Structure formats: C-alpha cells, structure tokens
C-alpha cells in the first residue's frame, strides 16, 4: 500500500485534530495542539518527500499518540470545556519589571556565552566579520564535532552560560505579549540573537530551532493567559510566511557554511540536505517501528529519555543524535532523526510510551485550565506540553539539560510572581464557559 495507506490514515489524523478543536473550542488546548501539529509534521513529509517510503504503521502510531495526549488533556482539564476569565487582568508593573530584567540579562549573558566560545576556541573576533574566514573556521569546528576527533571541549564559561541562550527566547515570547510598546517588543525579539549567534559560529541549526520553539511556546501560553485563544489569525499567517522565508534563506547560508563555501552552485546540495532533515523523520521512524516488532523484548527503562541527566551524573555518555544507527534515504542522504517516539517506545514499550504521552497531556491539561483561569502558576505546565510537542519530530525534548533548566527557570519566575503579587481568588462572576473561539 506504501504511502497511500499513510495518506489514508492521515485523513483520520486530520479528523481527530478537527474533532478536538470543535470539542475544546481552541487549538491552544494541548490535545488539539498536539494533533494539529502532527497533521503538519506527519503529513507534509508525504507531500514534499514523496520518494521516501512511509509505512501505515507510523501514521497509525500518530493517531494513537494523539488520542493518548488528548485523553490525558481532558482528564487534566477536568473535561472538554474550560472555565476562563471574562476580563483577564493586565500585566502588573511587578510582572513587567521581573520579566523585562530577566530577559535583558539573559540576552546579555547569552551573547557573553558566544564570546566565551570564540575566546576558548581560539577564533579571532576579526574572523567573525570576514565571511571567507568564518565559513572555514565554522566548517572545521563542525567536522571535528561530527567526527568526534580532536574536537576540544567547549569552554567552561560558554557552557555555564548556555542556559541563558535558551532562557532569553522562553521569556521573550512571554514578554512580547505582555508589552504593548514597540521598545518592549523589540527587546522580546532580540531574545533570538544569542541563538542566532550560536548557529552562525557553530553551524548548529538546533540552537535557532530551540529558540523558536521556546519563544512560540511562551507566546501562545501568555496569549491564553490574557484571554486570546486564536491561532490562525491573518497576522500570524503573514508573519509565519515572512519569517519562514527568512529562516529558509538563513538555513541555506548555514548549509553552505558547513561546506566551507559561499558558492551558490552548491545550493542544490544544501536543498537536498534541508529537505531530508526536515521531512525524513517519518521514513526513519516508520522503518525503525517496523523492525521493532522483530527485536527481542528488552526495554531500556529510561536510558534514552533520561540521557541528559544520566550523562550529567556520570552514569552514561550521550552520543550526538542519541542513536549511532542511521537510515539511508532514497534521496541519497542518511538520517538518525527517529522522532521523540523511538526513545519512549525503546525505553518503556508501546503501552508505556502511550502512558507517558497521556501524562504529558494531563500536565498540559492542568496548565491549560489554570492559565485559562488567569493564573500565572499554570504557565510552566503549559510550556511543558507545548515545547515537548514542538520537538517531537526530532527527539525527546527533556534529554537536554540546558532546556530543562530553562523551563525550571520560568517556573521559578512564576513562583516569584506569585509571592510578589499574591494569589488571591478571582471573583466567580468574572468566569464563563469556553465553548468556541
């Protein structure tokens, strides 16, 4: 049946996403959000990488995973309908001060992390402003890192300040919604600068992708906090198209940088790499899932999903990409992007993986209910659901210690707001049932 079977099941996935949207009233509900996101992440590869085979098994899993997340969300939310405030209170001066200062400091420390990387790697600052020298240096660092041969460890100061590279966009998305003035919004957008610098210097696209995921997650969670439940607005679609084009050009430049070249004749090679890295995950996961059934029963019980904390504690060493096995794609490239589902299934079996996804939905449902009611304390829980969902096409989000620390830091900020402002009950008369957007 090939990809046609996957296409057919994709219709079922779209139907489930639409059903969750109708029942919950908004795409921001984590159950609807997860299903919608995978309508794009699961079906677009069938369109833009048609030559790559995707089995029906992968699409069937996406439907099961979406149902699991949705079920957990409904339980955490206390049902399909959500109580929300009629007139959400605006951000207080204390909230603006706290988030503003944390954002500014994070951007500064994130840039210092990049400067420390330059100094520790012996790269003259002048090379950064000379494209011909920058591409050569970046290529050398990329090859050393990829081959794991002769690659010097990252400077200690650079590593220590790395969490601020990601804390900046996480807070930036929140601050962008809180601030109405142009200067505040520019500060919120500047939160991408440290991650962009990391990508330029180290040719790691993941840094910018992490920043986008964290920024958008904070942005959508805060919009819900202030009573705005719309996702597909005209402004959002226009900005998405514009920034998507800019991001594509940027990634083309990074691809050339990895090849130590500025020759536009190599754009076809870069395009192939970008397409396979963006859309190859369904083929890779599908092939692994088909082979999983023939393997002996031997769950690894957290060795993959907790690879980051285990490495930090000295119990294991994480390899780049988590898996040393790769899948050869028909297009001529290879990939080891198995999505977040392989770590879950490999560690906890299929029923266990679905249970964890249900738990993810439950956490998101609790956060959604709290944030919709105007409570900042639910934002970290909602962030957990959003960032995990955004990163599922690549791998399990929580293997990265710096990113885990980022979400914890946002939680601490929310806790400080609660202490600073107080958490008085809101009048029941200001609440209403959420039926539709």
Image (cartoon, rainbow, N blue to C red):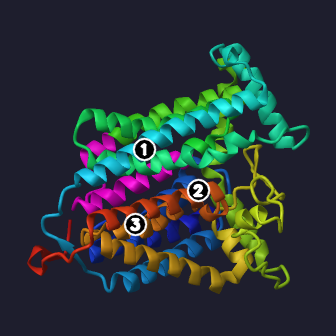
Q: Is residue 54 above or below residue 292?
A: above
Q: Kindly identify which residue carries mark 1.
A: 103
Gap in Å between the C-alphas at discs 3 and 1?
A: 17 Å
Q: Is residue 269 visible?
A: no
Q: Which residues are magenta?
A: 209-238
Mark-to-mark CA distance, 1 and 2: 16 Å
Name of the residue lying farthest toward the left: 429
Residue at image x 17%, y 63%? Answer: 88
For disc 3, the marked residue is 415
Looking at the rendered image, the disc whose residue lies closer to the viewer, 3 or 2, is 3
Does the magenta-highlighted stretch encompass residue 237?
yes
Q: Residue at x 26, y 33 (%)?
A: 182
Where is residue 45? Give x, y as percent.
Answer: 57, 53
Q: Earlier in the sequence, mark 3 or mark 1?
A: 1
Figure check: 141 above or below 332: above
Q: Which mark is residue 403?
A: 2
Q: Is 257 on the left-hand or right-hand side of 29? A: right
Quadrant in which the N terminus appears: bottom right
């Amino acid at each position: 049946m090939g990809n046609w079977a996957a296409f057919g099941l994709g219709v079922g996935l779209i139907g489930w996403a639409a059903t969750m949207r109708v029942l919950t009233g908004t795409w921001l509900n984590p159950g609807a959000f997860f299903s919608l996101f995978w309508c794009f992440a699961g079906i677009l590869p069938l369109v833009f990488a048609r030559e790559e085979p995707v089995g029906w098994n992968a699409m069937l899993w996406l439907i099961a995973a979406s149902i699991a997340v949705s079920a957990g969300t409904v339980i955490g939310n206390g049902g399909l309908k959500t109580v929300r405030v009629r007139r959400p209170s605006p951000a207080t001066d204390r909230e603006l001060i706290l988030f503003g200062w944390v954002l500014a400091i994070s951007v500064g420390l994130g840039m210092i992390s990049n400067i420390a990387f330059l100094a520790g790697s012996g790269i003259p600052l002048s090379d950064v402003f000379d494209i011909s020298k920058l591409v050569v240096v970046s290529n050398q660092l990329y090859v050393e890192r990829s081959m794991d041969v002769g690659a010097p460890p990252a400077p200690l100061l650079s590593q220590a300040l790395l969490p601020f590279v990601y804390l900046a966009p996480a807070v930036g998305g929140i601050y962008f919604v809180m601030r109405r003035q142009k200067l505040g919004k520019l500060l919120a957008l500047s939160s991408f600068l440290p991650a962009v610098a990391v990508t330029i210097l180290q040719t790691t696209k993941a840094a910018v992708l992490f920043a986008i995921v964290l920024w958008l997650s904070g942005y959508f969670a805060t919009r819900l906090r202030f009573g705005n439940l719309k996702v597909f607005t005209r402004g959002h679609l226009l900005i998405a198209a514009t920034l998507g084009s800019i991001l594509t050009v940027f990634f083309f430049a990074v691809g050339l940088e990895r090849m130590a070249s500025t020759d536009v004749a190599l754009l076809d090679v870069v395009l192939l790499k970008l397409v396979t890295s963006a859309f190859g995950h369904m083929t890779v996961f599908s092939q692994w899932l088909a082979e999983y059934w023939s393997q002996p029963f031997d769950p690894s019980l957290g060795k993959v999903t907790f690879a980051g904390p285990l490495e930090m504690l000295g119990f294991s060493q994480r390899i780049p990409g988590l898996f040393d096995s790769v899948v050869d794609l028909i297009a001529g490239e290879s990939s080891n992007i198995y999505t977040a589902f392989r770590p879950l299934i490999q560690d906890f079996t299929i029923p266990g993986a679905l249970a964890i996804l249900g738990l993810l939905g439950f956490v998101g449902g609790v956060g959604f209910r709290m944030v919709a009611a105007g409570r900042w304390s639910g934002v970290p829980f909602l962030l957990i659901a959003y960032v995990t969902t955004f990163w599922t096409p690549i791998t399990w989000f929580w293997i990265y210690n710096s990113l885990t620390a980022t979400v914890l830091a946002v939680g601490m900020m929310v806790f400080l707001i609660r202490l600073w402002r107080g958490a008085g009950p809101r009048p029941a008369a200001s609440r209403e049932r959420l039926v539709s957007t």
